[in-house]
Image (cartoon, rainbow, N blue to C red):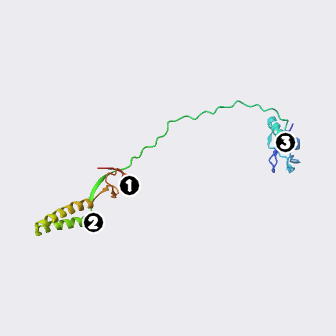
Amino acid sequence: MPDFSHPCPTCGVNIQFPEVQTGEAAQCPICATPVTLIPQTPVHDDFAKLELALIEPEPAQPLVVAPAIQPIPPATSPPVIAPMIEPPRAAIERKNEFIGSGCILQAIGLAMLPAAIFLPIGLAVISGVVGLALLIYGSRISSFLRCSLCKGKIEKGASVCPHYNAYLSA
């Protein structure tokens, strides 16, 4: 029975030899590389049988199938719920333009009201009514709604700012 083993530097197979062959030259039984036999560790009988089985396979024996082991399911932990990030809230601001078509209409309406004093009665009534209508219509055109956060214009009845995605409150 071999007492020692030495690995082949080329293929890595362990070459087994008795103690009396220590220091002698030998050839690897697999790749025929010349090897000097230097003992490394004593070979146990189980390892010797294993290495012999690698070199010279034994006749096949029927496989014994072990019963299947059921994997242990991982411990269930409660689902992680991400905190809800609430969108910002903004107020609706009413602003008026100082320059624009609404302001021009208001200026024309304001100029027509005093002119009604100097016109004959028929034209004065028409001038006064048209001047007052231009003042009211011009003020509606010149005023607009805007978001308090982004200062962008918003439509009447909007509940969310289209620029900032903030909830709008009156």
Query: Dot 3 lies on which element?
Result: helix
Dot 1 crowding, Cα within 10 Å, few <14, some 14–19, many 20+: some
Dot 2 crowding, Cα within 10 Å, few <14, some 14–19, many 20+: some
Query: Dot 2 lies on which element?
Result: helix
Instruction: List x then y, in percent, for residue 135.
Output: 20, 62
Q: CA distance from mark 3 to mark 2?
A: 100 Å
Task: Name the residue nearer the viewer: 23 or 10.
Answer: 10
Tell me which numbered mark, 3 or 2, is placed earlier along the sequence: 3
Q: Amino acid at mark 3?
A: Ile
Instruction: List x then y, in percent, for residue 150.
Output: 35, 57
Q: Amino acid at mark 1?
A: Pro
Tell me which numbered mark, 2 or 1, is placed earlier along the sequence: 2
Seen in the picture, residue 63 relative to 88 is either above or below; the reply is above
Mark 3 — residue? 55
Tell me which numbered mark, 1 or 3, is placed earlier along the sequence: 3
Q: Amino acid at mark 2?
A: Ser
Mark 2 — residue? 101
Q: Residue at x 84, y 42 (%)?
A: 55
In the image, farthest residue toward the front: 122
Q: CA distance from mark 2 to mark 1?
A: 25 Å
Mark 1 — residue? 162
Q: Residue at x 38, y 55 (%)?
A: 162
Tell me the mark number nearer the camera, choosing from 3 and 2.
2
From the viewer's perspective, is 66 left or right of 132?
right
Tell me the mark number nearer the camera, choosing from 2 and 1.
2
From the viewer's perspective, is 123 left or right of 21?
left
